[in-house]
Structures are given as C-alpha cells and as structure tokens.
C-alpha cells in the first residue's frame, strides 16, 4: 500500500476518533453510528499492519529494538482500548442497538468504563501519534510537496522540530 493511502486512512481514523470522542459535538445518535463505522476503518488499519504485528509478536522477547517494543505495546493497548470503548458503548447505546430492536438494561458502571477507556485510549493514540511523528511529517511533506514550496515546508518543519542542543 502506498504511503499516500496509509496517510489518508490514518488521518481519517485520527480525525474520526477526535470527532467521535466528543458526543456533544455530533449528538449521541450520530456519535454511536460514527463509532460503529470507525470500527471498520480500524480493522482495515490493523490488517494493513498485520505483517508487522505478527513479526513483532514473534520477536517480542528476543533482541527487539526498544522503540519497536514500545510501539507494539501501545498498539495492543490501543486495540484493547477500542474494544472496551465499543463494548461499553454498546452497553449504553440509546440509538444503535435500539435501531436493531435490542434493548439493554441501563447501568452507570458502563458509563464510567466507557469514559475511562475513551480518555485512556486518547492518551495512547496521542503517544502513538508522537512516536510516528517523523513518518507523519515526511509523508505529509512528500504528498503535499507540489502545493507548498520546498522552502515553506522546511521552515514549517524547522518550527515543529526545534531541537535544543
């Protein structure tokens, strides 16, 4: 898969997650439907990275480069986080499940789990984003090099990547 397609998919997932994270922004019914649509994009994302996931799983306890191990753990935690968000979200659903005629007995415990999982997963997604910043920046520059002048991209990159020497 090309870097441009991966970048677009990742940007779509990240933006969708941020929008869906605030149900007040979209309203609860749209929030629920957006999350369920987002599950499909996450599955595609994991499938695109399946080979890396398998290789890293096999080599996890061997002499694996440190950042790869951290990246792997964060990816697994994010995956578990999304499973928890979706499961708890379904348990408090007022739109998605009732649309299919499924009624769930309300419990405030599920609300707490849903909010905690959402906030912790957001933190992990931010860390995942930070760990991949070099790839994000290089891919962005490569995709949009025709729109911006090279000098503009270099100055933006310098402003973002200020290194204290």
Image (cartoon, rainbow, N blue to C red):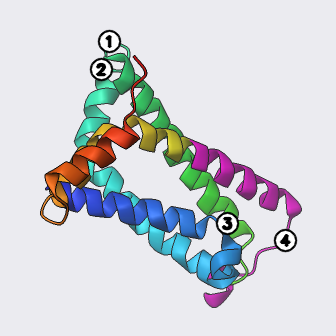
Q: Which of 77 and 156 is in front in this view?
A: 156
SS at circle 2:
helix
- Within 10 Å of disc 2 (Cα), the crowding (few <14, some 14-19, many 20+) is few
Query: Which residues are drawn in magenta?
Result: 96-123
**Residue 34 image point, x, y percent:** 53, 76
- At horizontal 63% and vertical 57% (from top left) the residue drawn is 85
**What number is the disc on residue 89?**
3
Question: In the drawing, does residue 115 fall left or right of residue 57?
Answer: right
Which residue bears the numbered disc 2?
59
Q: Which secondary structure is most common in the magenta stretch?
A: helix
Give the spatial CA distance, label 2 vs label 1. Answer: 5 Å
Q: Earlier in the sequence, mark 3 or mark 4?
A: 3
Q: Is residue 30 above or below residue 136?
A: below
Residue 127 in sight? yes
Q: Residues within 10 Å of mark 1 (few under 14, many from 20)?
A: few
- Residue 149 lies left or right of residue 113; in this view the side is left
Image coords of residue 119 (percent x, y): 67, 50
Residue 61: x, y in percent?
38, 14
Q: What element carries label 1?
A: loop
Whole-number angstrom distance, CA of label 2 to CA of label 3: 34 Å
Q: Does the magenta stretch include residue 110?
A: yes
Q: Which of marks 3 and 4 is in front?
A: 3
Q: Quadrant of the image for the N terminus?
A: bottom left
Q: Earlier in the sequence, mark 3 or mark 1?
A: 1
Give me the C-alpha separation between circle 3 and circle 1: 37 Å
Q: Is-magenta flag for residue 13?
A: no
Q: Mark 4 points at which residue?
A: 106
The answer to whether mark 2 and mark 1 are in CB contact below 8 A is: yes
Which residue, given by chain and number where applicable, does mark 1 sit on? Answer: 62
Mark before the other along the chain sequence, 4 or 1: 1
The answer to whether mark 4 and mark 1 are in CB contact below 8 A is no
């Amino acid at each position: 898969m090309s870097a441009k397609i991966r970048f677009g998919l990742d940007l779509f997932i990240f933006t969708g997650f941020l929008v869906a994270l605030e149900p007040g922004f979209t309203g609860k019914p749209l929030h629920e439907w957006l999350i369920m649509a987002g599950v499909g994009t996450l599955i595609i994302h994991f499938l695109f990275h399946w080979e890396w996931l398998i290789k890293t799983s096999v080599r996890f306890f061997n002499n694996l480069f440190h950042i790869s191990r951290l990246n792997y753990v964060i990816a697994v935690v994010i995956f578990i986080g999304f499973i928890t968000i979706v499961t708890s979200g379904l348990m408090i659903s007022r739109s998605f499940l009732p649309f299919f005629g499924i009624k769930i007995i309300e419990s405030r415990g599920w609300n707490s789990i849903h909010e905690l999982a959402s906030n912790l997963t957001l933190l992990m997604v931010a860390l995942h984003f930070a760990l991949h910043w070099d790839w994000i920046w290089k891919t962005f520059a490569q995709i949009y090099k025709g729109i911006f002048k090279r000098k503009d991209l270099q100055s933006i990159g310098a402003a973002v990547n200020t290194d204290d020497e």
